[in-house]
Structure formats: C-alpha cells, structure tokens
Image: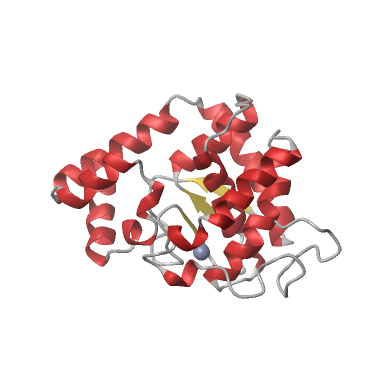
Amino acid sequence: MRGATVALALLLVLAGGIWLGGHPEALPGPVRNALVEEGPAVRADLIDTIQSHYYKAVSKANRARAEAVFSREATAIAGHPATVVCDTSFEHVGIVQEADGAAQVGGGVAWLLPSLCNELYQVRFKHHVQPSPKAGRAIAVLAHEAWHLHGVANEGLANCYAFQSGVRIGVDLGLSESHARALMREQLATNASDSAGNPAYVVPQGCHNGGRYDLHPRSTGFP
Ligand SMILES: [Zn+2]
C-alpha cells in the first residue's frame, strides 16, 4: 500500500518534472545519474530505498523529538506556530513544490525530505562535529521553508533569508557559530550553481552585507 502510494506519487511528480526537477542536486551523484538514465520503475525503487534507508533507523520516539526541535526553529522564523513534518507521503504535492521541501506561503506546516531530516537529526542528536555540506543544505532548506511559512513567496528571497537564519538554526542544533556560519556561507557561495536549472532560486540583488535583504544590517558578517 505504502509502496504503491509512493510509486504513484513519484509517477505523478516525475511526469510533471516537479519533484526532481527542482533540486536534483539534493540526491547523491550516482543516484542522480541513475534517476536520469533509468526508467520509472527503477526510479521509484531507488527513491523508496533512499528514503527508508536514511530515516528508518531512527525510532518513532526520536523522530518525534527531532520534529519538535525542527518545528520550534520553523516557528521562530514563521512568527506563528509551525509544524515541520518529515514526510514520505507526498501529500504536500500541489502546494509549493521543491525537491527537498514544501510549505504553503503563510501556512503552518512545512514538509522536509526524510533524508534532510536525517542530516538535521544527526547534527542535533548524534552531535556530528563535522557535518557535511549536505547538513548545511538541510539547515538551509528548513529555514527556506520556514520563510515560506512567514509569508515570503519568492524563492530567491526565501533562500537569501534562509542562509542568514540558518546560522541561528545551526547553533541551536549544536554547531559552533563559526561552523554554522561557514556552512551557510557555503550555501550562499554555491547558490548560483545550485540554482543553474532553476533561476528562480538565485538570491536577489541586495542579498549581501548591508544590502536591502540583510536581516542584520548592523553586523559586519554575511550571512
Ligand atoms: Zn521554496
């Protein structure tokens, strides 16, 4: 039943080029290549395997703890109560779709790809001291979706704010401020190349220190 649902959802989104079209870089290179080159059945199997692999090892209780932490972070950015769901059901398709997250602009719920939830979980609860760039990506996506909940519809602006808010999230998850900042600077630095297939995600002009979209114009660092 679940497999069939996932397969159906994948067929729907793959047909529209939505789910993977947004941010295929969210997937590991070999998997990404396989997804591009193989047929739909193989894609569905791979996605299912990836998702269950990353998050299945975490107990239900710990997943609930993790989602409570992520929800607090989203709430702080949204400015109103927000819930983060690490979701494999694809029920969110049809709102604001991205490869790795979804949220309704001004809404109260954000969905994250379970593999990204796993990255955040590893940082917060397993105290990974050397998080990968993917952890930075996961933090940025959480912040990005939270800014949608805040009311920001523009993808590039949501990224600009997210890279800045991500520093605080990283610190809250247990990273040093300098480490969290380095991860978000890396996200900003790779934003243009990450968004090559989807220019809407490129941060706007004014997304720099002292610029129009600097959330902390009095501080010298950016993000
Ligand atoms: Zn978005």
Front position in the image: 42 or 157: 157
Whether residue 211 is visible to the viewer of this picture, yes or no, is yes
Name the residue at 51% across, 25% down. Answer: 59
Tell me the quarter of the image containing the N terminus: top left
| Position of 58 relative to 10 (above/below) | above
Residue 178 at what x, y percent from top left? 73, 40
Left or right, 180 with respect to 39, comes to: right
Q: Residue at x 77, y 69 (%)?
A: 210
Kindly tell me whether residue 4 is visible in this rendering. Answer: no
Instruction: Point out residue 48 in the picture as x, y percentages from the top left corner.
Output: 29, 39
The structure's colour scheme is secondary structure
Residue at the far right: name it.
Answer: 218
Rendered residue at 64%/25% (across/down): 127
Which quadrant: the C terminus? bottom right
**Relative depth, front residue between 213 and 145:** 213
Left or right of residue 143: residue 10: left
- Which of 67 and 124 lies nearest the eye of the viewer? 124
Which x, y percent locates residue 56? 41, 28
- The residue that appears at 66% across and 50% down in the rendered structure is 166
Image quadrant of residue 42?
A: top left
Q: From the viewer's perspective, is 147 left or right of 96?
A: right
Total numbered labels placed on residues in the image: 0
